[in-house]
Amino acid sequence: MGDDARIERSAGVRDVAALAGVSPQTVSRVINEHPSVRDETRQRVRDAMRSLGYRVNNAARTLGTRRTHTLGVIASNAALFGPSVGVVALESAARSVGRWVTTAYADAADEASIEASLDHLLAQGVDGVIIVAPRLDSVSSLARRHPTLNVGALPSADGARAQANGAGLAVGHLLESGHRRIARVGGPGDWLEEVARERGFADALRVGGLDSLAASPVAHWSGDWSAASGAALAPEIAAAVRTGVGPTAVVVANDQMALGLISGLAAEGIRVPEDLSIVGFDDNTDAEYYRPALTTVRVDTDGEARRSVAEVLGLDATGDVAPPRLVVRGSTSRVR
Amino acid sequence: MGDDARIERSAGVRDVAALAGVSPQTVSRVINEHPSVRDETRQRVRDAMRSLGYRVNNAARTLGTRRTHTLGVIASNAALFGPSVGVVALESAARSVGRWVTTAYADAADEASIEASLDHLLAQGVDGVIIVAPRLDSVSSLARRHPTLNVGALPSADGARAQANGAGLAVGHLLESGHRRIARVGGPGDWLEEVARERGFADALRVGGLDSLAASPVAHWSGDWSAASGAALAPEIAAAVRTGVGPTAVVVANDQMALGLISGLAAEGIRVPEDLSIVGFDDNTDAEYYRPALTTVRVDTDGEARRSVAEVLGLDATGDVAPPRLVVRGSTSRVR
DNA sequence: CTACGAAATGGGACCGGTAACATTACTGGG
DNA sequence: CCCAGTAATGTTACCGGTCCCATTTCGTAG
């Protein structure tokens, strides 16, 4: 292109202003889409920006405004589908409203680790923080300790409600299939999503005419979302099934625990779905290829992410959030 | 002078300087660990910083230095274990050397999408960019178009070599188990990791005394890393196995494709490992709970990430990288 | 004791936008 | 046609570190 080989310091607002014949302030107004700029002026400035290859300098802008246009995301355990997908969805949602995302991974079970991640994000300066798959008290606790900070969560309160409904769908499917002894394998009890999914499960059972007694012989099993933790529960669950009065179906809190559970049950000689029906939650991309293919609940993570971002930034929500949906595959069958 | 109760703007270098009785410049030197500061002075400044709760303002610093201390990461498809784990490892590695990470997700197969992500990162200003699981030409192509930018990859060139060795381990295991007709299911051919794993596979076959002829009847199968793509290959592979002169073992380019393949093969009536041994790659957290549990190759992603970060930032590498390791489970058996 | 180079420190200007306020150009009502 | 009120634009200083360069202090050889 140009053979004037000089180190061109990238153009600034003043350069653009000079070329467009306006003041730097007007250029700034154009950048920020301030309404009080005549269309013709705006166009002239835009042209100048283009011909100079102008790019806003985020640092300068931040220095002046004290707003970084950056969203901090604290996520945990990337070996889990849920959080991974959530982080991607958040990044996409944030970018679509002109924000950057800085991510810090932490061990969600360890409050100190979360605090360290938050410190890291605060040092950089972020306009808000979203915690992915938070523990129950993480959000309120952080909000309390950093009153000036916008703290949000994925899922949001609305998202949690949706997940409760999703858990209800799973129960409904099992009831329709003739199951009456339905147990549940939960996640860690102090996680927001676990609480929602558990509540949805319990409510649906009650509505179906089965109170908690229906699940009484099976107690409450729970893991840590990992396949390993699902597998670890297999012996106990297998024993319950063998009694003949144990559960005929289990609603598991996420797909990966379901995977582990099925694997462990196989080792115990319990067949799925012949001896026990299993429903997962998330519908991760692999669930269809588990053996048997997993019946599970799909949630609209992208929609949820958009909602969470909008909430934290105080914007109007963009786009709808699809309600959760049951995906029936091979891990559930009618009760014999 | 007048001490009106005004909103306490967080302390800056000038405040610290005043309290410590030095110039702002000296405070700056302390912040940046410049050697030419007397120990006693340094200590005085540090004390002042602490007592004022001083925190560097990253934006101001960036504006002055033109360095953001931020690393950009471009990753693709978070539904895959490999990239997800890689991103986390990079974040951790970067943080441990005092950098922030801004992530942008892109569809790696779509050059335009990568370019858009890069634009996004450049607008923020990053000191370097690391592409996770890059296509073969992505890195060099970006480096060419943005000559001033530090571009790196995960895995690095060394990491790719290690993966080649890992693929060799898989082949070695199969040879020892008596397999002689060994096929391979690759990833997308224009991906760095695919090239490395394929090369390791081919080299090991040759060293084992089997040239490419051994694989000739099985052609070259490949997918896109997803379980779905693995499942899609099942009919064709099943047909080859049924001929009786097809492969007795398959080395698959990653665990998730192996999962899909096994699922698809089951539908075709091919049993793993009785009729066909299968080796995966990655050893993701779920592989142990696939059915059968997957024999696979584990790589040291954390170590690789540290190496990539150090490379891009021009630092000395910290910590060793563990060599890849074969994990033998139930998806492989001795040939009958 | 002097001289001189290195070490330690200080003094502005400056990075590139933007807030705050001032100014000028328009609009419509009386 | 004047004036208030709003729209459009300009002026100036400032955000908070750091760069460059000047200055002072120190160590030590001559």
Image (cartoon, coloured by chain):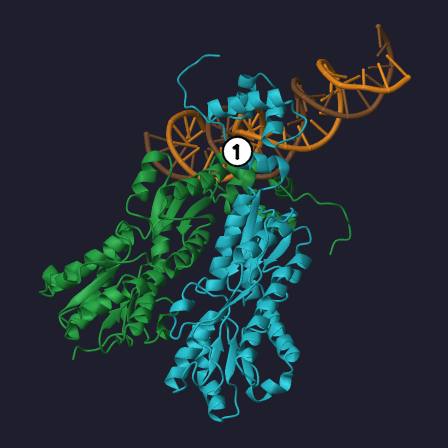
Chain colours: A green, B cyan, C brown, D orange
Q: Mark 1 lies on which chain?
A: B
User: Does the image show residue A231?
Assistant: yes
Using the rendered view, name the quadrant where residue B9 is placed.
top left
Q: In this view, does A45 lie above or below B201?
A: above
For label 1, the crowd category at 10 Å Cα-Cα, with few meaning under 14, some 14 to 19 and many 20 or more, is some
- Mark 1: amino acid: Asn
Where is residue A175? Give x, y as percent: 15, 71
Instruction: Work out whether residue B91 or residue B169 is closer to the camera in this orientation and state it.
Output: B169
Describe residue B41's horizontal placement relative to residue B82 as left or right.
right
Q: Residue at x 53, y 22 (%)?
A: B16
Instruction: Work out whether residue C12 or residue B331 is closer to the camera in this orientation and state it.
Output: B331
Q: Residue furthest bottom?
A: B243
Q: Is mark 1 on a helix, strand or loop?
A: loop
Describe residue A275's horizontal placement relative to residue B77 as left or right.
left
Q: Residue furthest left?
A: A209
Instruction: Work out whether residue B266 or residue B323 is closer to the camera in this orientation and state it.
Output: B323
Q: Is residue A307 above or below residue B28?
A: below
Q: Residue at x 23, y 78 (%)?
A: A274
Where is residue B37? Give x, y as percent: 65, 24
Q: How many marks?
A: 1
Where is residue B45? Give x, y as percent: 56, 22
Where is residue B184? Give x, y as percent: 54, 79
Using the rendered view, name the quadrant where residue B8 is placed.
top left
- Residue designated by label 1: B57
Q: Which residue is drawn at 37% across and 34% down?
A: A148
User: Does the image show residue A317?
Assistant: no
Q: Is residue B101 above or below residue B223?
A: above
